Amino acid sequence: MKTYLKTTINGEDKELLCEPRQSLLDVLRDELELTGTKEGCNNGNCGACNIMLDGRLVNSCMVLALEAQGKQVETIEGVADTEGLHPLQEVFLEEAALQCGICTPGFILSAKSLLEKNPNPTEDDVRLWLAGNLCRCTGYDKIVRAVLESAKRLSESPQSEVAS
Amino acid sequence: MSGSNNGNSQNGNGYRIIGSRPVRHDGVDKVTGRALYGADLRLSDCLHGKVLRSPHAHARILSIDTSEALASPGVKAVITSADYPETESKIIDLGEGPAILKDLRANLLADGKVLYKGHPIAAVAATDPFLAREATKKIKVEYEVLKPVLHINDAMAEGSPLLHEDLHTDSLGKKSDKPSNVAKHLRFEIGDIDKGFAEADEIFEREFDTAMVHQGYIEPHNATALWNADGHLTIWSSTQGAFSVRAQTAGILNIPESSIKAVPMEIGGGFGGKIPVYLEPIAAMLSKETGKAVKMTMDRDEVFESTGPTPGSVIKVKIGVKKNGKITAADASLAYEAGAFQGSPVNCGMMCIFAPYDIEHVRVDGYDVLVNKPKTAAYRAPGATNASMASETVIDEIARWASLDPIELRKLNAAKEGTVRADGLAYPRIGYVETLEACESHEHYKAPKEGSFRGRGVASGFWFNCGFKSSVTVSVEKDGTVRLIEGSTDIGGTRTSLAMQLAEILGIEAEDVRPMVVDTDSVGYTDITGGSRVTFATGLAVIEAGKKVQQEMARRAAQLWEVDASDVEVELDVYRSKSDSSKSITFKELAGSLDETGGALSEQASVSPQGVGGGFGTHIVDVEVDPDTGKVQVLRYTAAQDVGKAIHPSYVEGQIQGGAVQGIGWAIYEGYHYNEDGHMTNANFLDYRMPTTLDLPMIDTILVEVPNPGHPFGVRGVGEVPIVPPCAALANAIYDAIGIRLRELPMNSTRVLKALLKEKGALPQGVEA
Amino acid sequence: MDAFDYFAPDNLSEALTLLATPNKTSRPLAGGTDLIVQLRETGLKCDQVIDLKNLAELTQFQSEGGKGWTIGAAVPCSEIYENAEFASQYPGIIDAASLIGGIQIQNRASFGGNLCNASPAADAIPALIAHSVTCQVASKSGTREVNVEDFCQSPGKTVLSEGEILVSLKLPATPKRFGAAYQRFIPRNEMDIAVAGAGSSVVLSEDGKTIESLRVGLGAVAPTPLLVQEISDKLKGKEVDSATFEQAAEIARSYANPISDTRGEDWQRVHLAGVLTQRTLQIACERAQAAL
């Protein structure tokens, strides 16, 4: 039985009908056509589908869509704003922190949630926080460096910080 | 956005663009989630397909009843191998080796027998993915379950159950009388192997056993097909080669290649695993049956169980050596799992196993062995990592025996220009010794080793790289930017490495080139993205087309100035008249005058280059072993590689780092785990353990640049070499840490702990050593 | 995944009524990190999923003013370890909460869910055993308390009968000179399921040299997480030294009766049970001594 869902995605209210068995990932991609959130494993082990749910990082494949009822959802589509890319996105490009790019939206969401909690992470902090995001292309070196560099850049110019 | 640091300045390497680090052209799309991968495609009125897969590793199919599934809600079609059109069996070129069409078909939809758990049996198209999945469960299949063959040694044993009753061994060109699970026995030989061993002071003979591993790309396979009423078939998929999708699908469905348009979507990793088709022909058949577009995506367990991993292997190595460390002879036998159908990369392993060394007497035997596991596919330097694990750990043993530093021993025996490899090829200019020297003088190698249960290991590796065919079209826009149309799917930044080569040729900026990967209707024939070939081979096509553009631009300038074309000279982006120094025009200005000089300017080039530059790498790794748990932690890692010429150094470093880390995973974590029924018990990212951020240090890279004479900028393939050395480097480091040689992969904590306990005599009773 | 209905009641009594709906199988949902995987992949069938995250009793997390703490069964791990006051008192629990899954799993996964999933390898349970936690269970017919070491009965099965749910965990106040730790062995450094796990707690003598009392819980070495009572009985009063830790390890090994599976072998799990008992006891003692 389809059920009514009202949720806020990247600041915009969305109303739709969905099946209780649809995950938030299914609904984002298949109902709302927000395909920036990727599916890698569909069981919480790769982080490609990471999003923010009420300010907390979650695997959207491990959330039933109806659990987002009345909640705030942030996806990769909401990371850049009209001013341009988020510093993390800029630095990922400059530091070549992606190859095939399928894991990149998940990494950016994870990294963003880290920097919101801990603006000055050490390399170990970054590695611990990102351990739930698999990347098979890069060996993580440039990703970790990009997150550290973004942290530096964000703390040097707080005005450029994108509000969470 | 800042970040492009190329500008007009020289790089200090004689080039303007080559060697700089511009932001990749597809970058913004990828960091914002806008890039469209295969699963992101949305077509109107599209059905969803799902495959029914075998629950058995080896069984005869007695009957298939699809009637209940067909009657199930939302279901529009169900197909089995009985729905295949008639075809004759032939060999078709996948772009990275031939494939037997009959096997391709039987792998896509089982015909009579299922040969591995996960083998597709039927497929359903329905109005929604849940309904399609539910319907597959309603297909009734009767099986006669057979005993699975799961290990090479069992498969080769007398009396083993046979996967294919009609398969006879092709042994050095002769067919065996009796059917067998061994499809091929190959041999390379140079010199006189007995003479070589007779000259040796000591002979090292060792045996290795490695597990099957998967490429582990994060994006599952996908395909969408629309078989239009006009008979034209369009396929969208995430693939390493759109033309290969077209050729395989056409072969399987027995339709002309020209009736298919294959559209390459963005691809979320491949590493060789996205060369074969798994879904495309099935989606096409379902589309034909229903008259609608059909989209299919795999689940992660389907990716593990049903797409091509790289083989497990049993390798025997025998090396003879003089007291001074000089190798006199090397002999190896490599048996590789082909999976359910023949065609393992054992021949590649045979080429690579002793490739770093100049050895007079060499013999290498290879066996292509069928087992009830998925048909193997290419994985980054296919076959070479297994081989290197064996040879490079024996080399380490020899160095210790000869009391030589392992790099010294390698230098003493290193292959150089002119060295003849086991398969008979003489090397052109190669940079192996340079990677050894780079490691030897690197701070990592000189750093003292401190702490107990810590060790350092070194290993080298080789991959020959590929050429194949590539086509590009370059056209000039009126604003002076340039469109680069190519058919090489971009897995890791090749749009940019190609655009940079074009920019270098034309004297413009990398950002002024707009590279586009297009469908098979829109560009000339281009082989797969594989064999580390794109920056090299498609690069050569780009250079050729760029030069044609430059010539034509010069002709246009001549036309503008009403001089002879031979009067125009070009420096960077400036075209000048030799006879009248007042006449000069930039590329950009000239582009603005195209309309007055004959209209659009577009040039095409298709290449099939020789002159591929093989690549060598040498890696250093420090590990720490927890003596109580057997856990191996990588502390420090440095990888040196002869990259020929790094076009975009960041992405070259990235290839090396990514390859090394895949190798680290292969060495200590990864491996298909089967139960006795032949069911993979770790078909997910939780238990198929790929390295995470927390398992790794930074991966230092040393880019050694010994230019490949076969490419104007010196490009060598770089993507595959770095996965070759890590397993052996880790094994050597573990030996250095705990004094135990491990000869099985993965060297996971269970194995290391077992080895430690055995060494202490503390292995509990009843535990198999 | 088969179709099901979804309810998110906002009071406990409604939730209990829904859970007891006749002729329907119901599954309570907290963080979903086990349930959703099981629904999707193992063919687990249920007619209705009852989301418990709108229930105050299930989401409470508070100090009981000197009498310990209460953690609602649906409180996610990250909320637990982010509470500094709590963290200073329950180090073994913090160890466990910090290593379950990655950050994104910790933001969803709850201790209640970990208990109700009843995996032998559950990370939270040995730590909860070490901390002498009690489970508060409710049904339409009333409430009851169950000691955490008695909560799981076999893999996937708990003491909960139909219509009962785990509401919260009652954590006793930690005594003076208390220390605890949880460790597990996994092949990688994150994201794996425990091959073996051990949670230990100690109360030391005033001089910090003697163990007055101790508890050791083991994970992944038996059909359910185990309290090794023999360690508590035999080693109380012993000195804080490596001989005591080794004795504890030996007892732990003797209670380990694991299986071999894709994650580890039986002999390995037995061995690791000893190693982890030793290591966690030592850390627990060090933590207790640091608080002297």
Image (spheres, rainbow, N blue to C red):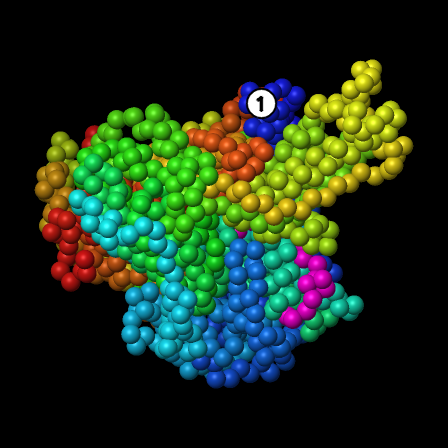
Q: Is residue B487 visible?
A: yes
Residue B334 location in percent, x, y? Answer: 34, 57
Taking the spot 78% from the left edge, 40% from the top edge, the residue there is B602
Towards the viewer: B739 or B56: B739
Q: Is residue B144 above or below residue C21?
A: below
Taking the spot 35% from the left edge, 54% from the top edge, the residue there is B189
Residue B364 location in percent, x, y? Answer: 34, 55
Q: Secondary structure at mark 1?
A: loop
Q: Which residue is mark 1?
A: B14
Residue A109 belongs to the span the image colors magenta: no
Q: Quadrant of residue B491?
A: top right
Taking the spot 40% from the left edge, 51% from the top edge, the residue there is B423
Please indicate whether residue B302 sits to the left or right of residue B402 in the image. Answer: right
Residue B584 location in percent, x, y? Answer: 80, 20
Q: Is residue C107 above or below residue B124?
A: above
Which quarter of the image is occupied by the C terminus of chain B? bottom left
Towards the viewer: B465 or B160: B465
Please indicate whether residue C279 sits to the left or right of residue A56 in the image. Answer: left
Chain of the residue where label 1 is placed in the rendered structure: B
Please indicate whether residue B135 sits to the left or right of residue C190 in the image. Answer: right
Q: Quadrant of residue B622?
A: top left
